[in-house]
Amino acid sequence: MRHERTKSRLSDEERRNFLKTLGVAGAAAAGNAAVDEVTLDDLREAVTVESTGELAAMGEAIRTDMTGELDADLLAGETAGVADSIDRLSDVRATGVPDRGEELYAQLTDAAWSVADHLSEVGFYASAEANLPRFTSDHIEATTRQLVNTEALGAALSAVGFDGRERTALVANVVERADDLALWEPTWVFEEAEVGEVNPEYVAPLHQRAAEGALLWIDGLDRHLRQNEVLLTDEMLDDGVADVRAMLGGFYLLGDAVERLARGEVSDAELTGLVSGSTAMMIASQTDLQYDLVRISDDMRAPRAGGD
């Protein structure tokens, strides 16, 4: 069965789940806004972060590991390239299905791969996995609260074209995808479980799998769309491009946060929220892409020739 969802407007159920996780009532969250149009800005005054001490300790540990390791100029330049890719997405969508030999989608990830390679080389992903908890319900709730209260989140996503409703939907989708997030295990789980078919030495840190996994999904779209062109509908392409935009938005948020870490411009608690939150966004949106565009079922495919 196809997973139905909207891209920038929350369903009533999604909104209720989101507000419940944040511990606020709909009317209190809305203030002067209509309840169905509540944004992160509306929620900021209604949502409190009970204690930032634990989140700050995690971020401080990552900061200590990364002292003197990060190249702020490289991160700034390549993260700007990710922003350009997000801006080019509308043109890619307008082109439709790539012709043979075209790499319209793969070209969107060039700058992101440069960031990913740098983060891997300096051990950032390993530090994040070592110092941040797995995606339990408690960590998702704490991360969501921190994201709502982090103005840098809104500023970063706004800079790459995400409006208030889209920013809210990105964060709310983290809550909606909590069960999927829980399936992503840190490397130490494989080491302790001694799973016969999995060699932990070849398993990348969780945050690296999330970030580079998102990029690999995008890289594979050119071929996937060509091979399945007869099955595709405009709705599927629109939803798929929205998922790609969400993945790139999450990656941009990660790159921006790490650049700000390199420059000493982010607090420890914010760093924890932004790294965990951006990772969760990338996991959630690549999961969505599978349902929206990759796993094509009979009820979502284009009509067969002859109209049957």
Image (cartoon, rainbow, N blue to C red):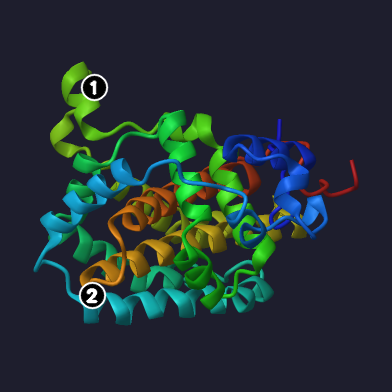
Q: Which mark is residue 197?
A: 1
Q: Is residue 230 above or below residue 264?
A: above
Residue 174 in the image: above or below residue 133: below
| Residue 203 in the figure: left or right of residue 80 | left
| Three-letter amino acid code at the position of disc 1 | Glu
Residue indicated by mark 2: 263
Report the quarter where the N terminus lies.
Answer: top right
Type of residue at label 2?
Arg
Task: Label 2: state its secondary structure.
Answer: loop
* Residue 267, image x, y percentages: 30, 61
Quadrant of the image containing the C terminus? top right
Q: Image height check: is 109 above or below 190?
A: below
> Can residue 98 be seen here?
yes
At a point 29% along the width and 65% down the height, the residue shown is 258
Task: Inspect this view and state whether residue 301 appears.
Answer: no
Q: Nearer the viewer, residue 157 or 289?
A: 157
Horizontal and vertical percent for residue 7?
69, 55
Residue 146, percent from left and from top:
45, 50
Considering every residue shown, the one lying at the far left of the view is 68
**Decide: marks 1, 2 in contact (CB < 8 A)?**
no
